[in-house]
Each structure stands twice: as C-alpha cells, then as structure tokens.
Image (cartoon, coloured by chain):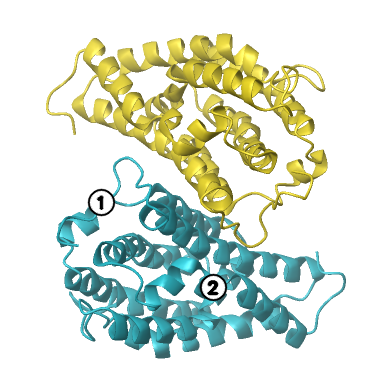
Chain colours: A cyan, B yellow
Amino acid sequence: MTDRILTPDELEAALRAIGAERYHNLHPFHRALHDGRLNKGQVQAWALNRYYYQASIPAKDASLLARLPTTELRREWRRRLEDHDGTQPGTGGVARWLKLTDGLGLDRAYVESLEGLLPGTRFAVEAYVQFVRERSILEAIASSLTELFSPTIISERVAGMLGNYDFVTEETLAYFKPRLTQAPQDSAFALAYVREHARTAEQQTAVLNALRFKCNVLWSMLDALDYAYVVPGHVPPGAFRPGPQA
Amino acid sequence: MTDRILTPDELEAALRAIGAERYHNLHPFHRALHDGRLNKGQVQAWALNRYYYQASIPAKDASLLARLPTTELRREWRRRLEDHDGTQPGTGGVARWLKLTDGLGLDRAYVESLEGLLPGTRFAVEAYVQFVRERSILEAIASSLTELFSPTIISERVAGMLGNYDFVTEETLAYFKPRLTQAPQDSAFALAYVREHARTAEQQTAVLNALRFKCNVLWSMLDALDYAYVVPGHVPPGAFRPGPQA
C-alpha cells in the first residue's frame, strides 16, 4: 500500500519507475534478440509464442469494452479493437503479426493452431486476459500501461532485427510501424484515465500492482522462451522445435 | 481427436502413456532436486513456489465440489478438502507443507504472503484453478489424474532429499508420507470415473487433453524454477532471492 495519497504527477512517476525496473526490454532474451545473437529457429520460437499474445489482445480489450459504462470510454477502447482486428480481411495488428511469422518461414496453420506454444506463454497470456476480465475497470486500464514503454522497445527491436538478421526484412516487420503511433495514443489515454481516477491510497496501490502484474506477464513470456530455446534449451514436451532449416 | 472410441483399458493405457512422456519426474529440476545437486537456497525456492500450488489445491477442489451433482460424488471429493485443509489448526496437507518451508528456514509470513513467488508459478497454478472452474466435470476430474504418477515421484523425492541434504529431516518431509496412501485412493476414484464417463471420441480426447494440460502446469512450474535459480539463474524482478545463509 502507498503510505499516503500521491499527487497525479507522483503516481505517474511511480508508474514510470516500475517500467524502468521491470519492463521486458531489460530481459536477456530481448537483448539477445535485438543484438542479433539468436538463430532463425530462436526468432521463430519468439514470433510463434508472441502470436498468442497478439491474438489474445482483442479478446482482452473486448471484455473490458463490454464493461465500460459510457459511450466516450467505449469509443476510445473500441479503437484498440480496430487497430488489432482491422476493418477488412488481412488488415490489423493480428494479421500483420502473421506476416511476421510467414516471413520467418513458419506455417500459418501451425502458428494459428497454437499447438507448438510453450505452456509458459499460454499461462501468462491467459492470466492477463483473466486479470482484465475480473479486476476493476481502473486496474484493467492500468494494466495496459506497459504501452508507455513500448515505443522504445519497438525501435530497438526493429533496428536490431533489421541490422542483424538477413532473414528479416522491413516488410516482415510491418507489424511494428503502426504501433509507434498507436501505442502512444493508447497509453496517453490510459495514463490520463489512471491519473484522474486513482484517488485513494487503495486505488493507487491497485494501479501500481496492475502495472507490476503486466510487466510480470511480459517478462515471464521471455523467461519461458529463454529457458526453452536459449540457455541451453529445454524444449518442454509437445512444444515447437525449430526444424533443420532454421 | 482420437480416431475411434477407445475401450476403457485403451483409454487408461493412453492416459498412462501421457504420464510416461510428460510427468514432471522427467524434468531436469526434479532430477537435480532428488540427486542432491541443489543448494539450500534452490531447495527453498522450490518449497516456497510449490507452497502456492499446495495452498491452491483446496480452492480448486472446492470449486469442483460446488458443481458435483450427487451426494456420493461430493462425499468422495470432500475427502480431498479434508486431506489438504485438515480438521483442526495445524493439520492437513497445507499445514504440513508449511512445516517443510519452516524446516528449510523460510519465514512463514513471507511464504504465506506469496510475495517472493515466481510469476511463472503464479500463472501456472492459476491456470489450473481456472481450468477446473471452467471445464466440464469430466475434464476437471481428469486433470487430477497426475496423481496416478505421484507415488513414484514422492518416493524418489523423499529418499533423494533425505539421503542428499543435511538440512532436510524426516520431520521436515512430513507432508509426503500421508500422500503415499491418499494419492492412490484419489487417483483410483478419478480413474474409475473417467473410464466410465468418457464414452465418446470427443470426451476421450478432452480427457487426454486435460491430463496433458495438467502435466504442462507441473512441468512449467519446474521450468520457471530451473530458469530462475539453476541455469545459471535469472531471478525475475521482485521474486525470492536466497539469502547468504542458504
């Protein structure tokens, strides 16, 4: 529990401090990915697992949308669904993520089947969807605040991957470019909402814990990848195993 | 999906084959634990994280109990709650697990606070509780069938830990002894139930997948421990860090 009620600026500073300590740009797997130290099979494993996160985001947002009480809030949150699901076949963030897995040589039906998913990915993503379903609207919105930190990680990832992997092209990475404008717009709204509505010490503590929780979701997805595919690689039974081409 | 409807014996054989391939006695962390290759801090981390699993089992069983349709089924399942929660303060499996964490020198309030839990543990355990809450009664019962395989792992664990660690005593391991008789009784009931009620190919597939899911829960808990504390140890932000005494 926070000791006293924070001002909105202090609350924002506390949120940003959590990101500085716990956001997954600090994870060894992220650093290995953008430094070019992974092989193609390891990058495939990342894209395959992260697909489940991308594909679950609209379900997460729709469950919050269904609970929002005003037209203004629903209109704002509906934009996230449009960004991820698109307006026509082949558009939107989920479809663009599949261009990434296509570009990496993964079979699309296999990716969408989720068969090769690490259990650690599945449980982390489902914990996030469940959190947004069960917690207060304030906590659900606060858990989206990792987007405050995502433009940095996206820029690092795109520059690092383009510079270091010959199997990655700008077209393969088409997912990320729109996120550089969408994420700041989304996080600006969520931050303003949290600054305004987290007024008691209990609410402020809940908001800070929601962001910690979400950082844990992203971090443990990279833990699972690093353990299964990198150090030195303990692929759990049934999960994706890179082929000889990788 | 199974290709055709299996006989009860074939279904049981298929369930046992899943255990032979995916039960966590095959995990490198389990082998290191019972071979005496862990230090005290690593054993503490195991006991601390596994506490959350133990403490969540009664909640899982109570949610199933609340959905069971007959006195006979509820009476059978209620026994599990009695085993874990006991009948008086200080009795039952959860209390005996705390004797283990006590014996390993962990502060009980810290263990019960769950503060030092690995996110991977939390998400896996919560996925199990959620599975039992949401799925059919048949799938929920089938997900308990890992107990078919637990007498072996318990015997290995107890013999290995007593033989290899001077900080472990028979009293510390008091949790495990009653499980050697409880688990076979529980799994005999669950197996008979599944053999009788999984009649269609869809039901049989669901039962096999429920056991695979549960094996993934246990396996990914050891993945998280092995990654955080053993190879070579990437403790995530905020999680338990063994002290200098360990």
Instruction: Compute the Cα span from label 2 to label 1.
Output: 26 Å
Q: Which residue is mark 1?
A: A241
Whether residue B93 appears in this view of the structure is yes
Q: Which residue is mark 2?
A: A26
Which kind of residue does numbered mark 1 sit on?
Arg
Q: Residue at x 71, y 49 (%)?
A: B242
Q: Chain of mark 1?
A: A
Which kind of residue does numbered mark 2 sit on?
Leu
The percent position of residue A211, horizontal first and vertical second, equals 61, 69
Q: Secondary structure at mark 1?
A: loop
Camera-side residue: B182 or A141? B182
Q: Which of the 4 image quadrants contains residue A134?
A: bottom right
Q: Chain of mark 2?
A: A
**Position above or below: A79 against B159:** below
Screen quadrant of the C terminus of chain B? top right
The reply, left or right, for residue A1 in relation to residue B8 is right
The reply, left or right, for residue B11 in relation to residue B22 is left
